[in-house]
Image: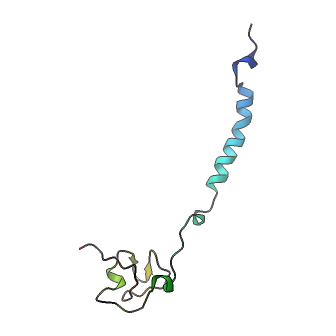
Amino acid sequence: MTNPSDKGVCRRSLLKSVPMIAGAIISTSAVPQNLFAQQKLTHEAAKYQDHPKDGQQCSGCVQFVAPASCKVVEDPIAASGWCQLFTAKPA
């Protein structure tokens, strides 16, 4: 007859590790989502101005979120504003 401990991992030790594994999974999923969120650029860093430049304005940019926001520059943003990150919406 063989000894059960000769087979490697026994069920009892495996079952003891399940709560530890579950705890690790739960703790990593409990990390706040904004911990990994990217910060928006300041108006100064983006060289934002509240008026258009050379016919370009925020309302025509792919980053603009109506009515007064931007995906990459901090709020508030004027629809008629402009910054150096302007990228025209596709036609």
Asked if 2 appears above or below 40 in the picture, the reply is above
Residue at the top extreme, as displayed: 1
The quadrant holding residue 33 is bottom right
Query: Residue 65 in the image: x percent, y percent?
Result: 40, 77
Is residue 16 rendered to the left or right of residue 73?
Answer: right
Q: Quadrant of the N terminus?
A: top right
Left or right: 7 in relation to 36: right
Q: Coloured how?
A: rainbow
Q: Position of residue 8 (x, y in %)?
A: 70, 22
Residue ID at (69%, 47%): 23
Residue 86 versus residue 61: which sits nearer the camera?
86
Q: Residue placed at 61% from the left, 54% from the top?
A: 29
Q: How many marks?
A: 0
Image quarter where the C terminus lies is: bottom left
- Residue drawn at the location 46% of the way across and 75% of the way down: 72
Residue lying furthest bottom in this view? 51
Horizontal side of 91 relative to 70 (left or right) equals left
Could you say where residue 73 lies in the image, as x and y percent from the top left? 47, 79
- x 72%, y 24%: residue: 10
**Residue 37 % position (x, y):** 55, 67
For residue 34, what is the image quadrant?
bottom right
